[in-house]
Image (cartoon, rainbow, N blue to C red):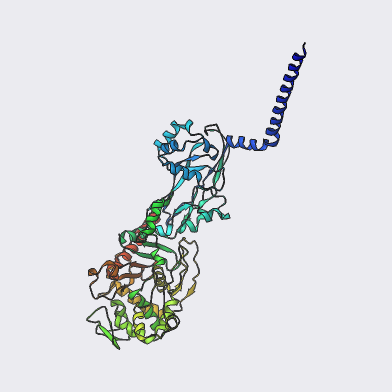
């Protein structure tokens, strides 16, 4: 063999050895240096960990009637490692979305880069069929089943029941929500928020093996979710429904309490909103519309609106004067339509006057002049003392939203806030629930609860109680004082000339008090004024008078007179509660006799 031939063989040998050396070095790099990384990538492409949301606990009313239900729906998920292989334009077309929506969801910051990206919720069967028909075009696209929330009574009780929403940025960082899937819905308001932890349960997960197109090959492991605890609220949906229907399109609030426990039997705030809007994620446009609505549907008027209580406050004035001995049941005052004080004229709502009357008829007919005199005798500081004893001027403690406290003025308040002395004319106004005095509907419901139960103040609760609670305090009011006042409140509804006859029920005996809070000092009839200048209408009540089971406050914003606007709503709510209750009692009696 020639030298040239040998040289060529040697050269080829060196080349082959070099190639083998490079190949061995590359294998060493891939298997030793980067083996762990590639192993993880390989397994990541083969295995999928799918979080399974837990079915949320069901919310019931006090009688076991479901107020919500869980509804399954289909959603489209995309595995993040397949992002580079997806045509967003084509995918958007199949899902009925804009490509910008797809990009927004893909680029949204997630807690983990391995979490599936939820592209669309509530898929129709046509959309599912379209996805399956083009499965090979979209590797890593998964159709999964999720659980949504349906509020069975729409906007009824929305301010108490609340709604769901996705984790906000601060909640995403909260350790309390570390086990919550990033796209899961949690309680964001009302009872859904207050009891979210027990309602939401424990999520599960599925570990599956998939092919290159993201199709499931087999299930490797499954940890089933644990359903959340059910919740029984204290509200009676029959009372709630009756009251809300009676409100119609008017703005206002109603709070009904169980006098011996503080349980909330009904809580209405009108106008309301439909929590189903939030069930699968409210759009930005819808959220802006809700928050910019001039009717303020998101405002909980039962706890967050404060107004002068008008003549319903005469209950406080009467209790203070009787309990302190400033008047007796026989104390008489002559009403000729008003009184003069300096250059001021303090009129009575009845221009011709009520004549000479005592306490009982003064309550029944709501005589302003009588209570001007009572206020003068007892003084503003004593009136304020008893108002606070009965729960006015402070939060009730119901943790639904941030409550307003209202205002119970006295001489010290006037001096501290305005550096002025208190005048008798201001006592006249305060004694009939005008002037500086302001309250919330829930405070007035608590006041009536205390009148009905003998002077005890209970913490309001939205959960049905299994045991009798202890009162927060006792208002220290003499039994004979409450008996006299309750007699007058019975007369308001049931006697001739009473201002609350519109609340009279054929089912139970009702006692109550009307109130009309003046908005503007304009001497025109209410229907001649624009709505924003009309008086506010109040009615507070309890029933049955002989053994109260319900105490409530109905308030209609710019509704006019309490007897005409608020009293019928209270009657409807009371009838709604007792109609169902009496039906159940009849059924029980029938079963007992069989």
Q: Position of residue 192 (x, y in %)?
A: 47, 56
Residue beneath the point at 45% across and 63% down: 401
Q: Position of residue 470 (x, y in %)?
A: 50, 69
Q: How many marks?
A: 0
**Residue 507 in sight from this viewpoint:** no
- Between residues 263 and 77, which one lies in front from this camera angle? 77
Residue beneath the point at 42% across and 56% down: 63
Tell me the quadrant of the picture where the N terminus can be found.
top right
Residue at the top extreme, as displayed:
1
Asked which quadrant contains residue 569, the reply is bottom left
Above or below — where is 184 with respect to 395?
above
Above or below — where is 284 with respect to 314?
above
Q: Seen in the image, is 51 located left or right of residue 298? A: right
Residue at the bottom extreme, as displayed:
342
- Between residues 66 and 425, which one lies in front from this camera angle? 425
Q: Position of residue 492 (x, y in %)?
A: 30, 74
Asked which quadrant contains residue 20, the reply is top right
- Between residues 493 and 100, which one lies in front from this camera angle? 100
Q: Seen in the image, is 399 located left or right of residue 315? A: right
Asked which quadrant contains residue 447, the reply is bottom left
Residue beneath the point at 45% across and 32% down: 132
Q: Position of residue 320 (x, y in %)?
A: 40, 81
**Residue 443 in sight from this viewpoint:** yes
Above or below — where is 478 with respect to 460?
below
């Amino acid at each position: 063999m020639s030298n040239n031939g040998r040289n060529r063989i040697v050269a080829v040998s060196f080349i082959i050895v070099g190639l083998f050396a490079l190949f061995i070095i590359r294998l060493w790099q891939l298997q030793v240096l980067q083996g762990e990384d590639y192993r993880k990538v390989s397994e990541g492409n083969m295995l999928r960990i799918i979080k399974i949301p837990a079915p949320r606990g069901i919310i019931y009313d006090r009688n076991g009637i479901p107020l919500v239900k869980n509804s399954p729906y289909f959603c489209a998920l995309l595995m993040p490692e397949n992002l580079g292989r997806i045509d967003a334009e084509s995918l958007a077309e199949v899902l009925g979305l804009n490509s910008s929506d797809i990009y927004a969801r893909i680029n949204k910051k997630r807690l983990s880069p391995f979490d599936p990206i939820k592209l669309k919720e509530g898929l129709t069967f046509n959309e599912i069929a379209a996805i399956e028909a083009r499965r090979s075009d979209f590797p890593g696209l998964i159709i999964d089943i999720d659980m949504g929330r349906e509020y069975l009574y729409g906007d009824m009780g929305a301010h108490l029941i609340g709604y769901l929403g996705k984790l906000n940025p601060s909640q995403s960082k909260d350790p309390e929500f570390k086990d919550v899937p990033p796209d899961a819905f949690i309680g964001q308001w009302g009872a859904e928020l207050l009891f979210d932890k027990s309602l939401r349960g424990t999520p599960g997960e599925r570990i599956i093996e998939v092919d290159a197109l993201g199709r499931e090959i087999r299930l490797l492991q499954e940890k089933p979710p644990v359903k959340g605890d059910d919740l029984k609220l204290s509200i009676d949906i029959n009372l709630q429904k009756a009251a809300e229907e009676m409100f119609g399109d008017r703005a206002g609030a109603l709070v009904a309490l169980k006098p011996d426990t503080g349980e909330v039997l009904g809580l209405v705030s009108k106008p309301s909103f439909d929590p189903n809007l939030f069930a699968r994620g409210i759009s930005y446009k819808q959220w802006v519309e809700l928050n910019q609505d001039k009717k303020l549907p998101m405002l909980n008027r039962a706890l967050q609106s404060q107004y002068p209580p008008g003549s319903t406050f005469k209950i406080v004035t009467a209790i203070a004067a009787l309990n302190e001995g400033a008047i007796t049941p026989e104390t008489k005052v002559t009403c000729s339509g008003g009184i003069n004080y300096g250059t001021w004229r303090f009129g009575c709502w009845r221009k011709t006057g009520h004549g000479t009357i005592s306490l009982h008829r003064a309550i029944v007919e709501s005589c302003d002049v009588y209570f001007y005199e009572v206020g003068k005798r007892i003084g503003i500081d004593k009136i304020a003392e008893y108002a606070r004893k009965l729960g006015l001027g402070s939060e009730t403690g119901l943790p639904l939203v941030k409550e307003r406290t209202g205002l119970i003025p006295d001489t010290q308040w006037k001096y501290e806030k305005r550096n002025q002395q208190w005048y008798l004319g201001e006592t006249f106004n305060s004694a009939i629930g005008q002037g500086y005095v302001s309250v919330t509907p829930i405070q007035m419901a608590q006041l009536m609860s205390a009148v009905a139960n003998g002077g005890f103040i209970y913490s309001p609760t939205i959960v049905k109680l299994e045991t009798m609670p202890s009162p927060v305090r006792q208002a220290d009011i003499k039994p004979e004082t409450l008996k006299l006042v309750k007699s007058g409140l019975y007369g308001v509804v049931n006697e001739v000339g009473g201002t609350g006859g519109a609340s009279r029920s054929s089912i139970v005996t009702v006692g109550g008090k009307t109130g009309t809070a003046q908005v503007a000092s304009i001497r025109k009839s209410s229907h001649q004024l624009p709505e924003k200048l009309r008086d506010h209408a109040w009615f507070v009540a309890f029933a049955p008078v002989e053994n109260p089971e319900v105490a409530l406050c109905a308030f209609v914003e710019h509704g006019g007179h309490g007897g005409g606007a608020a009293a019928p709503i209270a009657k409807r709510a009371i009838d709604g509660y007792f109609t169902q209750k009496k039906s159940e009692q009849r059924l029980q009696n029938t079963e007992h006799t069989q």
